[in-house]
Amino acid sequence: MPADPAHQADRHVIVGMSGGVDSSVASLLLREQGYSVSGVFLLTDDSSAQALADSRAVCRQLEIPLKEIDIRTRFRTWVVDTFVDAWLAGLTPNPCVLCNPTVKFSLLREAADQLGARWIATGHYASVRQTPENRLGLVQTGAGQKDQTYFLYRLGQDLLARLLLPLADWQKEAVRAKAGAAGLTDAGGHNLGQKADSQDICFIPDGDYPGLVRREAERRGLATSSWFEPGPVVDLAGKTIGQHKGLLHYTVGQRKGFEVRTTERLFVLARRPASNTLVVGPYSHLYHKQIRLTDVVWSGAKSLKAGQPVLARVRSSAVKAPAQVWPQPDKSLRVVFEQPVAAPTPGQSGVLYEDRLILAGGIIADDMSD
């Protein structure tokens, strides 16, 4: 009797391959669990060549097909240009947060539909839970490894319903050991379990954010001189106390990179492009009691009540802080912390949890008056 096509689709999963150990072991685990696995590699820019070669090598070893999709034009328009525009608007964006739902996972879903697959999967460390209200939400795992729910909070219900995360309960050391035990190697024949994790933003491998923004702004003919020209560093009283090398080189909370005539430990509090001034002050002035979240995405919760207690994170490395949420008429959320939190930065994301479950999240707006 021929196999049921519907059953075949239910066991067919598309894995987003990166050439790294996480996506490779995720593919291996899914194959061991009886899934029909197909890899998909998204070619985002010219620097992806090595990652593509490593993905090809792993898929050959796992004996799974690899579909390669050239998305360089879409990636530049949707991710790089958006990143540059946000920087030039005075924000500090997190491109991964926006890329995941609009580009990466959206394209994986398109590939799954084209290949007749029910599921999509990645090597992220997180899990998906169904709530009593019949919602799906991302959940921090308890395995003690790095948490990646913050970067995925904008995934909608439709994507979460198709998402498999086989590394949910794995620690990174165990993943590396699994790759080594399976004999997985990169394109050069090196043990994949020893491959270093990717760092920083994928399209800025050298970490030179100002250089990237400048090149892309010049390519697009944007007027950016105010962001690159040296200018005064001022204190909270507006007194000039030093010189900066161009506002684009600084983010809120930064302590280095500017010259001041004082021995006091000072931090960047604000960038003012209209006057090309960098405002600095004591670290205590980086603390805020409340933030406002815009462009809100709902995950485990469909709504929140006025004054509802939550745990909020204002950056990927921040601990969750107790707070209350106050929905606003414009659909933004005012988040009031029990204790002030350090350096919530406009353009970054604020993500709201109930224990380990993501309820909602949004972009931190530039008005944080306490």
Image (cartoon, grey):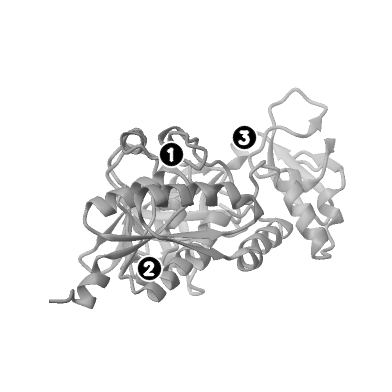
Q: Is residue 123 left or right of residue 269?
A: left
Q: Is residue 112 above or below residue 83?
A: below
**What residue appears at the point 83 percent right and 27 percent down from the top-left corner?**
261
Give the labeled residue for mark 1: 185
Q: Secondary structure at mark 1?
A: loop
Where residue 47 sits: x, y (%)? 64, 50
Distance in Å between CA atoms under marks 1 and 3: 46 Å
Kind of residue indicated by mark 1: Thr
Where residue 43 sits: x, y (%)? 57, 59
**2 vs 1, front mark:** 1
Kind of residue indicated by mark 2: Leu
Residue 321 seen by the camera: no
Between discs 2 and 1, the one toward the N terminus: 2
Q: Is residue 69 left or right of residue 128?
A: right
Kind of residue indicated by mark 3: Tyr
**1 vs 3, front mark:** 1
Give the labeled residue for mark 2: 159
